[in-house]
Image (cartoon, rainbow, N blue to C red):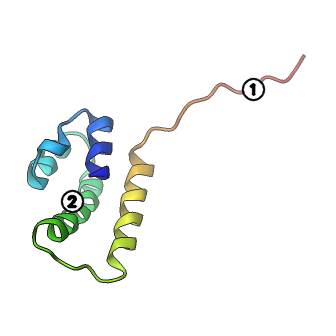
Amino acid sequence: DIVRRYLEQRFTISASEMTTFELEVALGKRIDSHWIERIIRVLNLCDLAKFAKYEPSAAEPSAAVEKIRSVIMALTPAIETEPNDHSE
């Protein structure tokens, strides 16, 4: 759900109301396929755990967090700050 909320706010889409497939289509119009693939892999794993009672291996949750972290870091625009002028 956290990933979907981020995508909703970042791309102004109704990610929480979409299936993973619908979200994949919606993102296809906004970001590079490399990032979509990473997002969808994680969401598919989450879907399996949530709806099919899939039990991930010990390493899968950590790997999923790292994948999403890299996606968010890549897709979030840098905050532009004005340089500090300490000259007098």
Disc 1 marks a residue whose amino acid type is Asn
Q: Secondary structure under badge 1?
A: loop
Left or right of 52? Residue 58 is right
Q: Position of residue 36 (x, y in %)?
A: 24, 54
In the current view of this chain or complex, which residue is farthest to the bottom? 57
Residue to which mark 2 is pinned: 40
Total numbered labels placed on residues in the image: 2
Q: Position of residue 75 (x, y in %)?
A: 38, 45
Which residue: 15% across, 48% down?
23
Left or right of 20? Residue 36 is right
Which residue: 42% across, 42% down?
76
Quadrant containing the C terminus in the rendered view: top right
Residue to which mark 1 is pinned: 84
* Figure check: 30 above or below 36: above
Q: Position of residue 48 (x, y in %)?
A: 15, 70
Q: Secondary structure under badge 2?
A: helix
Q: Residues within 10 Å of mark 2 (few under 14, many from 20)?
A: some
Which residue: 29% across, 44% down?
5
Name the image quarter holding residue 38: bottom left
Disc 2 marks a residue whose amino acid type is Ile
Name the image quarter holding residue 41: bottom left
In the current view of this chain or complex, which residue is farthest to the top? 88
* Figure check: 24 above or below 48: above
